[in-house]
Image (cartoon, rainbow, N blue to C red):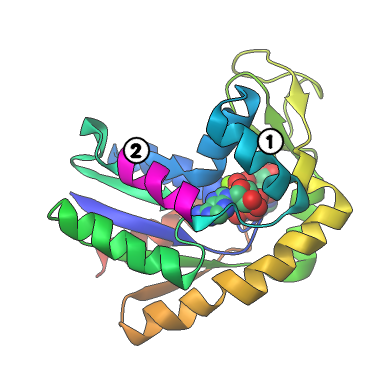
């Protein structure tokens, strides 16, 4: 049983790597971005509140996000561990995670920081496509679907995330630098950070993360 946090800028590959690690270790991937997008799609109270922040590339208020994570981590499937993708995203959320986990009698085992340079991030985000039906992620060049417009798994329609348009990408990168990047130092000082070079093939990066976990 272990708990893992995936840190990294937008487009670093947190979603892609989280999915592989979840399959390898049979523990759920908890992505606040995915939870929020589902809420927006279903027009729930949370989704209605979150949408305007997400469309601008800003962080959704902590009070909303911390509560959904606390609730999600209490579910039975998280009992044997989980992978947090996209949370925490600022110091307040990092402190909230510690508190939530302490309440569950758990702690954080691994913090993986995926490093990818800005130029590569922009290529990745602008070419990303996502299945509207099952959420599977693709990339027009790096991970294309067989049919450009349809998901390989469920034939759902592929779409471009609203926040993957050029202006919003810039806003997200700025928010990352100002609010999320300070977490790198926060965790480094605790001696808990593992940095991984996130440039390369999908499988090679998974292998690097798995090796880092197993050699700790
Ligand atoms: P969120 O969904 O978390 O977005 P993000 O952090 O910006 O990260 P992304 O999902 O864009 O990228 P990723 O690192 O998962 O990369 P991926 O694997 O998809 O958050 C969205 C919004 O929700 C936020 O802006 C905020 O408003 C809100 N939110 C979420 N969490 C919040 C929180 N805790 N607090 C407040 N607000 C919150 O890869 C990207 C692309 O690159 C894909 O197309 C993929 O195929 C490709 N790719 C991946 N790896 C490789 C590789 N090795 N080589 C080539 N291509 C690759
Ligand atoms: Mg993601």
Residue 67 in the magenta stretch? The answer is yes
Q: CA distance from mark 1 to mark 2?
A: 20 Å
Is disc 1 surrounded by few (<14), some (14 to 19) or many (20+) residues within 10 Å?
A: many
Furthest residue in direction top, as rendered:
155
Residue 158 in the magenta stretch? The answer is no
Magenta region, main secondary structure: helix
Tell me what residue is drawn at x 45 percent, y 60 percent. Answer: 88
Does the residue tagged 1 have its C-beta within 8 Å of any atom of ligand 1?
yes
Tell me what residue is drawn at x 55 percent, y 54 percent. Answer: 61
Is disc 2 surrounded by few (<14), some (14 to 19) or many (20+) residues within 10 Å?
A: many
Tell me what residue is drawn at x 18 percent, y 60 percent. Answer: 102
Furthest residue in direction right, as rendered:
166
N-terminal label among 1 and 2: 2
* 50 over 105 or under it: above or below: above
Do the numbered discs 1 and 2 sit on residues whose CB atoms are within 8 Å? Answer: no
The answer to whether residue 145 is visible is yes
Give the residues drawn in magenta, as a range: 63-71
Please state the horizontal and vertical placement of residue 86, each as a whole percent of the image: 51, 54
- Which type of secondary structure does the marked residue at label 1 adopt? strand
Please state the horizontal and vertical placement of residue 101, each as a whole percent of the image: 23, 56
* 78 over 176 or under it: above or below: above
In this view of the protein, which residue sits in the foreground, 208 or 19?
A: 19
Tell me what residue is drawn at x 79 percent, y 56 percent. Answer: 169
Furthest residue in direction bottom, as rendered:
189
* 23 over 8 or under it: above or below: above
Find disc 1 in the rendering and name its residue. Answer: 138
Quadrant containing the C terminus is bottom left
The answer to whether residue 142 is visible is no
Find disc 2 in the rendering and name its residue. Answer: 28
């Amino acid at each position: 049983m272990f708990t893992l946090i995936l840190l990294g800028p937008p487009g670093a590959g947190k979603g892609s790597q989280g999915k592989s690690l979840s399959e390898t270790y049979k523990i759920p991937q908890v992505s606040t971005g995915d939870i929020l997008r589902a809420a927006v799609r279903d027009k729930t109270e949370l989704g209605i509140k979150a949408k305007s922040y997400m469309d601008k590339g800003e962080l959704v208020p902590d009070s909303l996000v911390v509560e959904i994570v606390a609730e999600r981590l209490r579910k039975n499937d998280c009992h044997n561990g989980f992978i947090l993708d996209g949370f925490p995203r600022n110091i307040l959320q990092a402190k909230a995670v510690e508190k939530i986990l302490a309440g569950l009698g758990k702690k954080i085992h691994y913090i993986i920081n995926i490093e990818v340079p800005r130029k590569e991030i922009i290529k990745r985000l602008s070419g990303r496509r996502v299945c509207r039906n099952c959420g599977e992620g693709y990339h027009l060049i790096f991970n294309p679907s067989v049919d450009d417009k349809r998901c390989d798994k469920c034939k759902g329609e592929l779409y471009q995330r609203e926040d993957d348009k050029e202006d919003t990408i810039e806003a997200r990168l700025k928010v990352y630098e100002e609010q999320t990047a300070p977490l790198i130092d926060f965790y480094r000082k605790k001696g808990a950070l593992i940095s991984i070079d996130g440039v390369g093939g999908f499988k090679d990066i998974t292998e690097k993360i798995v090796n880092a976990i197993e050699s700790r």
